[in-house]
Image (tube, rainbow, N blue to C red):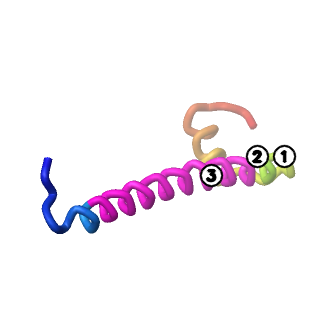
Amino acid sequence: MDLGNHAGFILASYGLSILVVVGLFAWVILDGRAQRRRLAELEARGVHRRSHAQTAETFGEAR
């Protein structure tokens, strides 16, 4: 495969794109873990999501 005179630019662009996608993927994974941790801390303190009460009422569950 001959990329011609622009091989450096093309390969650098692909490399940078891969780094950005991997970085975004890592950010989403780490942020998701942080959000779950924060949610668990809030629920441990007794703070519940508003949707939890609606779900319990809908399905006849007691809190």
Pick whichever, 23 or 43, lies toward us.
23
The residue pinned by badge 3 equals: 30
Provide the residue span drawn in magenta: 11-40
Q: CA distance from mark 2 to mark 3?
A: 15 Å
The residue sitting at 74% across, 54% down in the picture is 38
**What's the mark number on residue 40?**
2
> Within 10 angstroms of label 3, few (less than 14), some, or many (20 or more) residues?
few
- The question of residue 28 being in magenta is answered with yes
Q: Are marks 2 and 1 in contact (CB under 8 Å)?
A: yes
Question: Callout 1: helix, strand or loop?
Answer: helix
Residue 37: % across, % down: 74, 49
Residue type beneath disc 2: Ala
Question: Callout 3: helix, strand or loop?
Answer: helix
Which of discs 2 and 3 lies nearer the camera? The answer is: 3
The residue pinned by badge 1 equals: 44
Sequence order check, earlier mark of 3 and 1: 3
Residue type beneath disc 1: Ala
